[in-house]
Image (cartoon, coloured by chain):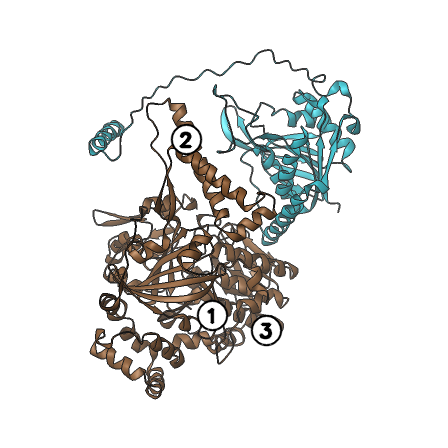
Amino acid sequence: MEKYDVAIIGGGSAGLAALKQLSTLGKQAVLLEAGEKVGVKNISGGILYSKKPNKGKVYNVEDIYGQNFVNEAPLQRKITQYLLHATSKDKVFSMDLTAAHEYQSNFGYSVLMNELNAWFAQSADESAQKSGGGIVPGVHVNDISWDAEKERTTIQTDEIDEFQVKAVIAADGVNSEVAQITNARPKFSATQLYQGVKAVVKLPENVINDTFAIRADSGAAHLFAGDITLNHLGGGFLYTNRDTLSVGAVYHFDSLLDNPTEPNTLLDALLKNPMITELIKDEVPVKGEIDKTLEKEKQMQIRFAVIKLIKTWYEIRDVHLSSSRTKEMIKTGKFNSEDEIKSKLSELREKMSSEYGITFKTDYVEDEYGAKLIPDGKRCRMKKPYKNNVLFVGDAAGRGIFVGPRIEGLNVGIDDGVRAANAIARALEKNNFSQGYLGEYYTKSIEESPYTKDMKEIDKEYLKIFIDATKDVPKDVLSAKHSMVLKLMSSGAIRSMAAKFVNVLGYERLLPVIESEESYVKVPIQLAERKGKTVSSSYTPSIPLLADRIAKLNYNDDKVSHIKVLTSDNDFMRKLVTLCPTKCYSEEKGKVTIQHEGCIECGTCSEQTDWKHPRGEKGINYRYG
Amino acid sequence: MEPLNLAVIVKLEPDFSEGNVSYKPDGTLNRNETKSTLGPHSGIAAKAAFYAKVKYGAKISVCSMGPPFAELALEQAQQTCDADVLHLYSDRIFAGADTLATAETLRTGITDKMQGKMDIVFSGHRASDGETGQTGPQTAWKLGFTFLGNVISYDVNLEKRTVVAKCLLTLNGVPNVIEEIEAPLPVFISIDPSYKSNYTTVSQRIAFEKYQKEAYERAKNYKQYLKVFNIDELGVDKALVGLAGSPTIVYQVERIPKGKATRQAEVLDGSNPEHIRKAVAKMKEALSAMVIK
């Protein structure tokens, strides 16, 4: 049997950070990723933060991947504008939360996980190979066993021979199978989770710059609350990437269970809001009708030509509407000048309309639909994120920060990854992997992390920034209770005392008051109605059907289902018919059944099913993530 | 122990994938408008050679006979198998060769122009653009190597210097019979389309990733590894290659007649409820016939 020092299970940003850190410390580690490549299973909102807390230290991306990280990594846009919008029909009331976004922060970049994790992987793999380790994609871990006498930990997989390790890092995400195998924690329940659903919208770089009034190197983040939530607790987001937008909705899972609504409907509610409709709009070619009286072969020829022309038009237009890509194309000699690109584009356009009857209209284009469960660290972080010699990091340990508009997960996972790596490196040196020496040390390190503090306590400084941002909110839209709280909190001395008081009492107890229908839905709607500006949209977006969204996704189908239904007739399972983002569940004669083929592995159904990640290389392959 | 010395013979073929292939109005291939690529079966042969490199350590040489632009096939093969040497045998005299003449060209390259004695030579099962599946067996015969056909997996015993291969055959009309053969090196392996490399340990997987990266980098500068030989440089007997060396005479090519459709199709409009009803009625009718009472 082969032997390695450390196995890292899961190649998300937390697992990769752990691999990079262990390898930098000269320790041997292998990372096992179930996807055919690192990154294809990952999806995020997403913004990647680098933080500088006043007290304590966090490990940031640039600490691990080098100070040149920002210049080298495939980041999208540096978020320089952070806005919160309250919506009600065509009324929108906006607040600037840029100060809250920049609070204790070096930077926040919008990112697309597939590309970014591939970059992390390349860097981590290079270091890992120097220490005799590396990344092994396409392998799904199905069991871990311990032989205490022989001090052996054995990793078993679906694809390769079992092998021995001294310690394990579980970085297998919110639906961690390792947590089930090791019995380290129960599955997360609805009250501890959010369900996020996202669409990546295509929009050329220059169009984004103009629409959002931002420079090419900066970006905007917009959050939404109010009627777009369709009365659920949560909200919408829209982040600008380089030449795409990430548009999505994140809701408390229990609020979705109370009032089941299809995730794609929640996404559509967002896209139908006139403000968002205007932000995503673009010029889109529309195929003309093919003359059915023509010969079959001629019809086919036209159909192929139209597909090819539209594809080419998009390609050249994307270059034309991006200064960086224009430069790149001229540099590589594909085009001689900007004018050449321009004339080529208009030539193409002319041909499209005159020869093939293609017209152009205002619309938007969706490229990828995706969904994910997100753990709320306030409610579900593991108090002791280990079992035996297995350390849990990131989503697997239930560690995400959700405080008002502050939403962070990637940076938390990365910090965890480094802490786990450091703890294991220390254990390797003493060859002591006991719970006391390894697990407890890691727990202490995690407790010291400022991120853990953010999950446990109210930060009065952050509270002040948030309250300042809401200064334009008329107090009478709030209930007497909330209005009183806000009034008290506006005074520095009382805020300080109140925060202390709450932290002593226990932050969790206050959460139902803060995260309520009133704060997510009612107040924003009132605000928008009374103080909002009217926004109108100039077109009706052609929102794709769920079937079309799924058809655009890329799967490597497995004949065998990775999910097994345990009980087919309870309330939860019936609600899944609505809540599964890709409608894998259906109900007939009171029995709920699954068809796993369209599954995007979000884990919405995980709590009450036998849920496993698909075997190696199988399942969803996200292009953006 | 010496690393294995391996060769792969590959072929440049038309790219039949969507968007790259083009047909003439009569339905035959329009070669001028169709892009070329490494033949899919040649690709599998390269994958099989790569397996030995990852698992046992090996030096891989890839060769092809073809026009100058066939170097594309060698570049793509290098990307697959991390080849150390690329040979292209290219000369107008080679044109019009049948499989026997092609085998002679490849055999000469393998024995005379590649370094050291070969342990295993790999070929694809067939080509996608012509019935040239004999090239492999004929090259094996000319090399005097043991020929193993339809190989779906193999392993090498480095100490005994043998190959243990699983071959797929049809035995007395029974399909999918797997025969396991142990043969002393050198051998010639023709790879079955269903071949799969089984990397079963962590170290093999890591080596696979490492060499794959190396292959990708190497293929970016494939010209550094490429050597092109004309007929004189190859030093092959002119009477045995090209049209002159081809005993095959194609005297007529018949178009395969189109089979008559036995089914009839009717186009229904999915947005028309009347049409849907019609479709459901048809389905019911079809299904009722299938119910066993």
Residue A621 spot, x, y in % from top left: 45, 49
Circle 2: element type: helix
Same chain for labels 2 and 1? Say yes or no.
yes
Mark before the other along the chain sequence, 2 or 1: 2
Instruction: Give the amino acid at mark 2.
Output: Glu
**According to the rendering, which colour does chain B have?**
cyan
Q: Quadrant of residue A374?
A: bottom left
**According to the rendering, which colour does chain A have?**
brown
Tell me the chain of label 3. Answer: A
Residue A51, placed above or below residue A196: below
Q: Quadrant of residue A225?
A: bottom left
In three-dimensional space, the C-alpha distance between marks 2 and 1, rounded to whole angstroms, equals 66 Å
Circle 1 residue: A386
Q: Nearer the viewer, residue A407 or A281?
A: A281
Image quadrant occupied by the N terminus of chain A: bottom right
Query: Residue A426 got which mark?
Result: 3
Residue A602 spot, x, y in % from top left: 38, 56
Same chain for labels 1 and 3? Say yes or no.
yes
Number of marks in the rendered image = 3
Q: Nearer the viewer, mark 2 or mark 1?
A: 2
Q: Nearer the viewer, residue B182 or A319?
A: A319
Circle 2 residue: A355
Residue B242 spot, x, y in % from top left: 70, 20
- Residue at x 30% of width, y 51% of height: A538
